Amino acid sequence: MKKKKDNQVFVPARLSYMYAWEPDEETGKYSTQLLIDKSDKETLAKIKAAIKAAVEGGKSRLANSKGKIPRDLKMPLHDGDTERDGTEYEGMFYLNASTKNKPVICDRRRQAITDRSEVYSGCYANVAVNFYAFSKGGSAGIAAGLLGIQKVRDGEQLGGSSVSAGDFEDLGEEAADDFLPADIDTEDEDDGVEAVTDLDSLLG
């Protein structure tokens, strides 16, 4: 296995807000949100170490006019219990990872997955992430880049449910009034979140 850089980590997580097949129309980026179990101390320690490596490697970019790194850097890891609603966030940390380039998507045997129904919001995966420093518009911090996704197992779909033909009503032969206007309630996905600034207290 190729040695990872210090700012890279494989994160076992549940996928949410998954735009890995096509880029998000708003951002133009491929992205996914990672739900990480708070009990997974080993993974959280690796994430913390990778973020620290990104801070160390990005000192020149993060430093202010006095050459100091601000204490209020934006951090990518967030507390799902306090920052988001929804049962899927209970007992979870989360982070958003994105990239301009299409990420690798493979199965447990490292074979490429081409069936888009196989990888979706709600399934479980190992996600390759790299953390990097950014400074833009007076805001500085650490962001997460999405490198690849290895699906591990299925899970209950988030942001919608799967259906089969048996879930529909038998309408018989086509009739003139089969298609009538209907109000459809949709929920927009929003990955904009406030950053947690104190990583040490967040991870305990």
Image (cartoon, rainbow, N blue to C red):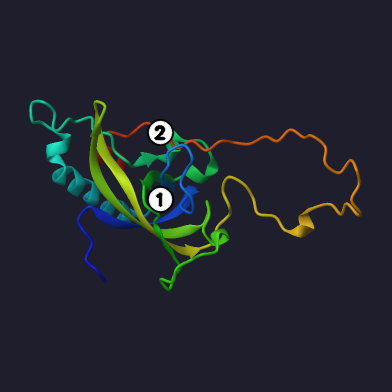
Quadrant the C terminus occupies: top left
Q: Which residue is located at x 26 percent, y 27 percent? A: 137
Quadrant the N terminus occupies: bottom left
Q: How crowded is mark 2: few (under 14 residues within 10 Å), some or many (20 or more)?
A: few
Quarter of the rendering containing residue 203:
top left
Q: Which residue is located at x 51 percent, y 36 percent? A: 85
Image coords of residue 20 (percent x, y): 46, 52
User: Helix, strand or loop at disc 2?
Assistant: loop
In the rendered image, the residue lying farthest to the left is 66
The image shows residue 81, relative to residue 36, as above or below, that is above
Q: How many numbered marks are there?
A: 2
Viewer-nearest of discs 2 and 1 = 2
Question: Is 16 or 118 nearer to us in this picture?
Answer: 118
Cα separation, mark 2 vs mark 1, equals 16 Å
Question: Is 118 or 43 nearer to us in this picture?
Answer: 118
Task: Tell me the tag on residue 120.
Answer: none
What's under tag 1, amino acid-wise? Answer: Ile
Tell me: 138 left or right of 89: left
Q: Mark 2 points at which residue?
A: 193
Image coords of residue 15 (percent x, y): 47, 52
Tell me: 112 left or right of 42: right
What's under tag 2, amino acid-wise? Answer: Val
Image coords of residue 42 (percent x, y): 30, 57
Q: Name the residue under label 1.
A: 36
Image coords of residue 105 (percent x, y): 43, 62
Tell me: 180 left or right of 201: right
User: Helix, strand or loop at disc 1?
Assistant: strand
Instruction: Point out the tag, 2 or 1, that comes first from the N-terminus.
Output: 1
- Residues at badges 2 and 1 in contact (C-beta under 8 Å)? no
In the rendered image, the residue lying farthest to the front is 176
